Image: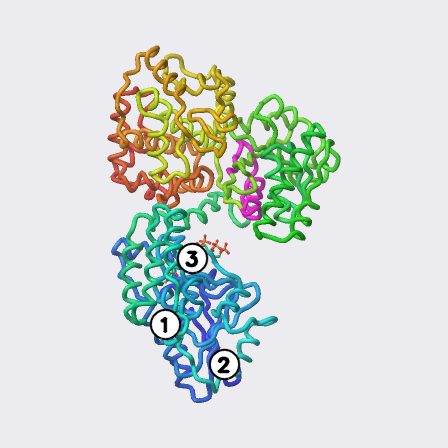
Amino acid sequence: MSELVKLTRQDDIAVVTIDNPPVNALSPGVPEGIVASIEAANKDPEVKAIVVIGGGSTFIAGADIREFGKMTSGEKPRIALTPKLLAIEDSVKPVVMAIHGTAFGGGLETAMAGHYRVIAPTAQVGQPEVNLGIIPGAAGTQRLPRLAGLAKAVEMCAFGAPISAKEAVAVGIADRMIEGDLLTGAVAFAKEVADKPAPKTRERNEKLGGVDPAVFATARDTAKKTKRGQPAALAAIDAVEAATKMSFEEGCAYEGKLFNECLFSTASKALIHAFFGERTVAKIPGIGKDTPVYDIKSAAVIGAGTMGGGIAMNYANAGIPVIIKETAQDALDRGMAVIKKNYANSVAKGRFSQAVMDQRMALITPQLTYDGFEKADIVVEAVFEGMALKKEIFGKLDEIAKPSCILASNTSTLSIDEIASATKRPEMVIGHHFFSPANVMRLLEVVRGKVTSNEVINTSMNLGKKLKKVAVLAGNCRGFIGNRMLHPYFREAQFLIEEGASVEEVNKTLFDFGWAMGPLAVSDLAGLDVGWRIRKEFRHLEKPGVRVPLVADMLCEHGRFGQKVSCGFSKYDENRKPMPNPETAEFAEQVAREHGIERRVVSKEEILDRCMYALINEGAKLLDEGIALRSVDIDIVYLNGYGFPAWRGGPMFYADTVGLAKVLARIEEFEKRHGSDLWSPAPLIQKLVAEGKTFGDRDKAA
Ligand code: T1G
């Protein structure tokens, strides 16, 4: 019997316990151990029925995702799970699957191969494979519709969201909810069914008939809109639909074919990179589980503007009482009104109840004074992007906050070290850069200053998880990781319109690539005046004689600040639908005329490469400087903060898929044409190309 699966007995019930921490993944040895245990139980005359349960905090969370890389690299052949699940289903003695925590992917498929399923009230079940760019590969698309019906199966397999225990019972996946101890309840249930026939899910076809074909058509339309660039969602719909047309065996073979096609797709490799990336970024070299963390039980936010309000909501959502301070009553009222409206929208959409909203609102204390700040475990400053104001505030906090209070700034560009210099405790100062809307966007850029302590960094990374954010550690430089890389990306987008591309061509090219929005559309949404103000603040840092984009400044000088005034690079109608803005084209032609820039037809390929390679090149410089720890950190920043398509894996992963040699050659071409002040290749790219390595290889070696 494998170490990963244990077989015990409770009276005449065999208990098979999976013990493969942390999530009981179906690693090699686990499926084999389950089948061997069930076979042994069937041979034991004293055994009447069998319970399968997960050890630790969860049932099976799926196949072992780490094995996929070995399969796609040819290191290991794919070991099909389906035959093992058939062996479970063919058990003569009834098999009861006892589910707690999560039964995801291969975990739910294993549960459905059992004859009965009982479930703990807080458990979740799901087929989240599409989030990894694949589809269920162990008959999930064939057994799930037989238990839950076709519509529910399509929804779960094509869109990947888990369902609650209550819903699992309601739709027929689970047979009973077990309140109290799950094993006790499962053994009692097994005794009840011991003498009953063991119903095989694969033979339960009653829910496969009479389905409205619109179920599949509607799902395909939704998938085309919401799962752009991700073929797995459509493949999952095809596989579930096959259950209505093919036998179980034929359906499984068809599912297997689609599974393989998806598994070897770049989209799947990218999404699996993102899955593990989100876990890797939490690991900071030199800061381990033994590094102390401060206990954050209360918070205070300075500024009730768009960012301050969203940040306060994150704390309230996590159950942490939070003060929100403003300088004027009207500003405070406006901020609180936005918070209230945001919560009311969530209640209206059924995300949570009015009672939950009231609880969260009650945790937010609006005020105009610093009263209570002396008790706060963390203060987050979210005021206007001006160094003088921030230093004044941190100087004040230095006087009133308790010694163990973490002093965080939500600045998106300013130096954390300079802000910290306004205090006598710079080791307690750190950047907590949230992304707008802060209560929605998952990314939290945690910016360490030169002397920020490991305890403060570790606390911030853990706090990120508590606030349901993906925290990524960045070094202190202008724009940290995300905004620093965005600068050359936006620069090239603007240069391209000066050289002859239209705003629409630039936006569409990057949108088609997969970005949520094109660069000039993002600038219009964020407000051109934000960048204009920062450019004016840093004008003195610009190197004389080096080309800078000029159209945005001209638009701002004419008050064309973007969507908020219905006019920026593009014009916007009352429904915010973009239309060409002739002024932008005029300003671009004027800039070209005045600066001797040749106007020409610019290819889609050049638009994409100029924008993407500018981003990637800057990313490589960040890695060289240690501002970003790993290339995957950069990828996770862009996937969770900048609308970069997850199925492309992130800018650095994308560069590896293109091939660094090709990327370098193109950068060198641009350097020749546009000069090394703008396009000097990052030494890291040159080094990796010389060594025949990738960014991924560098991460593995880190
Ligand atoms: N395989 C391998 N490692 C896994 C894993 C998995 N399925 N799930 C989690 N881990 C690792 C993770 O990398 C981390 O490692 C640690 O476990 C804790 O995870 C045949 C083909 C279950 C909700 O997609 O959604 O089945 O960083 O930090 O926040 O049809 O993990 O500590 O080294 O996320 O408590 C389908 C994936 C697979 C579920 C727990 N299953 N996992 O969340 O912990 S495909 C999934 C999760 C499949 C079949 C197909 C979450 C979780 P480390 P964690 P958590």
Judge the density around disc 1: few (<14), some (14-19), many (≥20) Cα neighbours within 10 Å.
many
Q: Position of residue 77 (x, y in %)?
A: 26, 61
Residue indicated by mark 2: 9
Give me the disc on residue 50: none
- Find the distance from the CA under tag 3 to the CA under tag 2: 33 Å
Label 2 vs 1, first from the N-terminus: 2
Please state which of residues 686 and 595 is positioned toward the viewer in this rendering. 595
What quarter of the picture does the N terminus occupy? bottom left
Using a 10 Å C-alpha cutoff, classify the residue at mark 3 as few (fewer than 14 neighbours), some (14 to 19) or many (20 or more).
many
Where is residue 88? Give x, y as percent: 38, 76
Specify whether tag 3 is near ligand 1 (CB below 8 Å): yes
| The label number, if any, that marks residue 85 in the structure image | 1
Residue 603: quadrant of the picture: top left
Which residue sits at x=39%, y=26%? 580
Of the image marks 3 and 1, the number of the one nearer the N terminus: 1
Q: Amino acid at mark 2?
A: Arg
Q: Quadrant of the C terminus?
A: top left
Q: Amino acid under label 1? A: Leu
Q: How is the image coloured?
A: rainbow
Disc 3 residue type (three-letter)? Pro
Query: Which residue sits at x=62%, y=23%?
Result: 389
Residue underneath mark 3: 128
